[in-house]
Amino acid sequence: MGKQTLYDENEARVLVNLAAAAYGDQHQACLNKSFPAHENRAILDTQKEDCDSLGNTCEGYVVLSPIAKELIIVFRGTKTKAQLLLEGWDSLQPGADFFGMGNVNRYFLNAHLVLWPEIEQILTDTKYKDHRVTFTGHSLGGALASLAAARTAKQGYRPGNMIKIVTFGQPRVGSLEYARNFDNMIYYSFRVVFRRDIVPHLPACLKNNTNGLDDGTAKPCDTADLNHAYHHGTEIWYPDDMSHGANYIECTGLPKNEDMKCSDRIKFFPDQSNSYIWDHRHYFQVRVPEYGKAGCDEKLPEGKPGFFEKALCFISKSPDCEEHTLTRSVDIPVFPFKLTINYEYMIISALYDMQTMGRIILKCIPLFLTLNLVYALPKAGQKTLYDEDEAKMLLNMAAASYGKQHIACVQRTYPRDQKRVILGVHREDCDWLSNTCVAFVVHSPVLKELIVVFRGTKTPKQLLIEGWKSLEPGIDFFDMGNVNQYFLNAHLKLWPGIEKMVSNEKRGASSISGSEDCSARKSDQVKVVTFGQPRVGSLQFSRKFDEIVPNCFRIVFRRDLVPHLPTCKMIEPERPGEGTSKPCDADDIHAFYHHGVEIWYPDSMDNGSKFVECTGLPHHEDFNCSDQIKFFIDQSDSYLWDHRHYFGKMISGFGKTGCNEAMPEGEDGFFQKALNIDSRCECLNRIILLHDENDYRLLSSPDYPRFYCANLDCVWRIVAPTSKDRVYFFTDNLDLREDKDFLIFYDHELLVDTTDDNVTEAYRCTGDDACEFGSSSQYLTVRFTTAPGSSEKFGFQGSISSQDRLIGKVKSFAKHNWALLILIGIVLIGVIFSAICCVIQRATRKAEPIETREKLLQ
């Protein structure tokens, strides 16, 4: 058919060099090898900024050619696993509006806002007003190039015919609405995709299930839904290789920008992940990040492998070591996913490396199985049979599963006269990456009791796979309803060993079989107690579980995020609370839903702490308990801490010490001791984007409510939803050393330099009084500084929002009491109308005698 587009492969090969250079510090070297010397190309600007709550950076640089009158703006791709996980996290939240063009990924938007000010200065510089602009980047860099190009056109810095964008392995940036607006403004836009690179297919678009090519292909993207992820620009697909002269396809077919004759037709399988990663890292026969770090040396297309990489590749091949070819795969398609449930606040649980896996539902005996459970009544003042003392002992058992000190934990937890012994420890590989799942069984012949314990998630890879599997449709669990595929697979791996250990003990109990119905054991003989458990299966599974295992308690500490994953299907509450989430739908039997009664500790888990028995509605998803919490990406450190700590102990570390009460946080390893890690002394400097007027965030001193450290200098930069909005901070529990430690407010642009003595402070607070401040613009910078010397002060915990407190309270009252306000309005109108009628009537009566006298005189 001949060429159908303006795509220039030679230009793309040059730009991939620049995209590679962004990963290292050899920008000029790559530049010199990519352009003729007479074009006089030079680096005009470089920038590197923190762009998320974990301190991951976003980078870019600008290339100037006064001869060609061109600016090339280059963005770096994803650099760390943590950054990749946060991008995935934000891809599952609702997008944020991008200057009226449609919704875009929140992580990409945040990174754009951080890097944009310097780019804007260059674009508006009169010296370069006649220079055309090209945007490029690999992976995340491609997404940032997309937003920068769109904003350049939208705000009139350049017309569309002076803008080019060429990206490599770019993910979907925004919604279909954003894609259409982008295409209407920028005409020269190409997304280069190599073979089976999986990143361009993330986040998943909404699939049109009524239309597919055949059983061997994926489903096409739906072009009717404006709000789901969708690509802009023309895909250029290299289906085989990217050598000189290799075949490529200009994907101009349907659906527009998601041509089903190109890479969108590919089905992805979990056991082929190495090949997808290899393809994403390699474009035009170079390993993009490492090639750039080597200064674009053509003799080193794979870069310079370090000592550790060489050693690891010798031991075990990975996507970094060699090209991976596809093999026959098991027929379990996984990416891209159709999100059939509401992922409004879904966050891929990639930061939570603890108990997720430990709550596998193993047929009828998830965590605690008794063979002779004595019937008990609720304790005084309680509504359920929850026993906190029992829970604390079981927590020790859960902690023991992370280490090798099982016997020590048993001996330190239970009285000797119970004669508890370990029947066995069972370990199995439970996925294709050889992550393990572990269980052990404790037996008491005196009490005729078995405790079956399962270990939680241990590695980041295992956590990723769990999150991956939670996005797929569940698999039926013995006609009880669908459950998470990863949990089911782990159950099937571990069950034979558990069954053997239990059934071999002839203690007057019938054997337990993975194939028999749960009713084979009486419901009053089975108890379940879990800590930080995720949702395991569907509402149908939950109901069946409750029928056969009514004695089940899920303990949740404060703002532990994992119990809220995978997300349930949410509905609008009858009376929404300010800053709360949405309740789970109790009618959709296929959506994820919890079983058992939640026991929520909203404040602390010290001895005597208050807990809530969550028996309200929705059933098992009580909206008066932890389900009401909204979760935000920039608060991830507090969610992580809560998930790892139950009853004052860091679970995995505590278990590895043999449940030594003198070491509730476990024993520091060599590297931790060397680095002297202390969360109280770590500032997680961040940019916080407020999404709308109802978005209320918590801002607190490090490790609040514990004593803070000396010599802190923490900085938070807050951005209101629009340029018309303002940022308001308030706290009434300030606890600082008078005139030594301060909360300082800067009412300036986003990237104000707080270390510059010439920058004027707007306001500061100290001591133990309340503290309140409102910005005069869209941006507010809050700084927390502490002086040298030990402190026995707690710091602060405050709220930030885009609403003044008084206005917010008025709006909240109106929102939650609208029926009462309407009634009051009707009454007031009636009163006013009655008053007017009375005035008119009195005036009429006064006029009548005068008229009568006049008639008599006549």
Image (cartoon, rainbow, N blue to C red):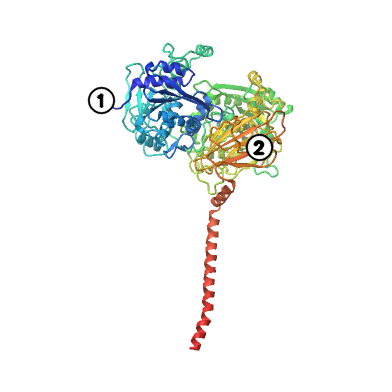
Q: Could you say which quadrant of the image residue 744 lies in? A: top right
In the image: residue 61, left or right of residue 554: left
Query: Is 2 positioned to the left or the right of 568 in the image?
Result: left
Q: Given the current orientation, which residue lies at the most extreme left position?
A: 1
Q: Secondary structure at mark 1?
A: loop
The residue to which callout 1 is attached is: 1
Residue 195 vertical placement versus 850 (above, below): above
Q: Hey, which quadrant is residue 234 in on the image?
A: top left
Tell me the amino acid under the disc marked 1: Met
Given this view, does label 1 or label 2 mark the residue nearer the observer?
Answer: 2
Disc 1 and disc 2: Cα gap in Å?
67 Å
Mark 2: which amino acid?
Answer: Phe
Is residue 662 shown above or below 382? above
Decide which of tag 1 and tag 2 comes sooner along the chain: 1
Above-or-below relation of 652 to 692: above
Q: Position of residue 225 (x, y in %)?
A: 39, 39
Image coords of residue 697 (percent x, y)? 57, 39
Residue 515 image point, x, y percent? 52, 30
Q: For mark 2, does the 10 Å Cα neighbourhood hold few (<14), some (14 to 19), or many (20 or more) residues? A: many
Indicate which disc residue 760 carries: none
| Number of numbered discs on residues | 2
Labelled disc at residue 796: 2
